[in-house]
Image (spheres, rainbow, N blue to C red):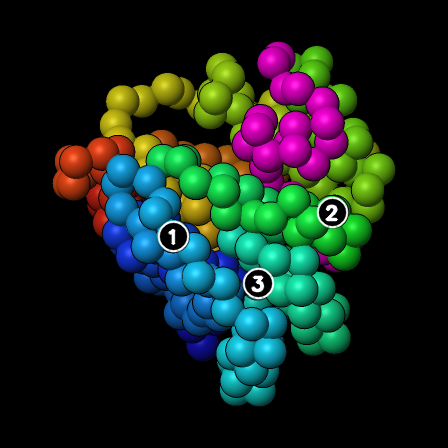
Amino acid sequence: MTQVVLTIGGSDSGGGAGIQADLKTFCVLGLHGTSAITAITAQNTLGVQHVFGLPPEIVVEQLKSITDDFTIAFAKTGMLHTAEVVNAVADHLRMRKIPFVLDPVIEAEAGGRLLRPDAVEALAEHLIPLASVVTPNIFEAQALTGIEVRDRQSANQAAKRIMEAGAKAVIIKGGHLDCIDLLMTENQAILLPGERVRGENHGVGCTYSAALTAFLAMGHSLQEAARLAKRFAERALLGSMRVGKGVGPVSQAAAACLR
């Protein structure tokens, strides 16, 4: 049977990031994607103009509908917006024993706060200990740990701090540094090199975490899934589209063609 995966996050009206990027990624990788929307954003390539958060009970009802019907091979969380939604999502994932990738989406790449300060604390307390892997970029790693990530040494310190918060594994994404990701587990730390490619980068973080989720659902090891997801995100960026007046979206379809 086709594997079913789940994304829990915000809707991007511009179609470049969030739920839209996740579902496109799942589709081109051959999986069936389901979604629970936590917030609706008025967003385009220029940034996030407004965020309309959904009540936690509506998020929970979506999750119940999905998990009452589908067997979820793997899930991912993206924009959760409020502490109440973080707690509700954590309760449901724990109760249903669903493995998941935690992408701690705090700010939009094009600009705009997506996670309230109190929700950052709730995420660290309730979701990080449940996650199969946490995938912050350097700014999200700083928000979670208070450590400014400037190089490999500080990335290593931040990863250790997130591990101490209960994470099973951490990937500090190096796109804003030298394009080398740091994968840390309880037993090892591995550097995952990449290449810096030119392109429009709206949605690249969501695309990476969605691809990681998909490859884990397919049965790949964490290390191999991380390598494949990094390659997929690079190809999506390389095939990105110049649409709108600001930073254009990456192309998941182009990434699939280039695999």
Q: Which residue is mark 2?
A: 121
**Disc sitting over residue 74 in the figure:** 3
Asked if the residues shown at circle 3 and circle 1 are in contact, with their CB atoms under 8 angstroms apart, the answer is: no
Cα gap from disc 2 to disc 1, whole angstroms: 23 Å
Find residue 160 and report its horizontal and vertical position in percent: 78, 29
Question: What's under tag 1, amino acid-wise?
Answer: His
Q: Nearer the viewer, residue 97 or 36?
A: 36
Label 1 environment density (alpha carbons within 10 Å; few <14, some 14–19, many ≥20): few
Q: Secondary structure at mark 3?
A: strand
198 lies left or right of 10: left
Residue mark closest to the camera, 2 vs 1: 1
Question: What's under tag 3, amino acid-wise?
Answer: Phe
Tell me what residue is drawn at x 67 percent, y 69 percent. Answer: 88
Q: Earlier in the sequence, mark 3 or mark 2?
A: 3
Task: Report if residue 130 lies within the magenta region.
Answer: yes
Q: Quadrant of residue 202?
A: top left
Q: Which residue is mark 1?
A: 50
Which region shows up in magenta?
127-151
Q: Quadrant of residue 191?
A: top right
Tell me what residue is drawn at x 62 percent, y 12 percent. Answer: 151
Q: Secondary structure at mark 2?
A: helix
Q: Earlier in the sequence, mark 2 or mark 1?
A: 1
**Disc sitting over residue 85 in the figure:** none
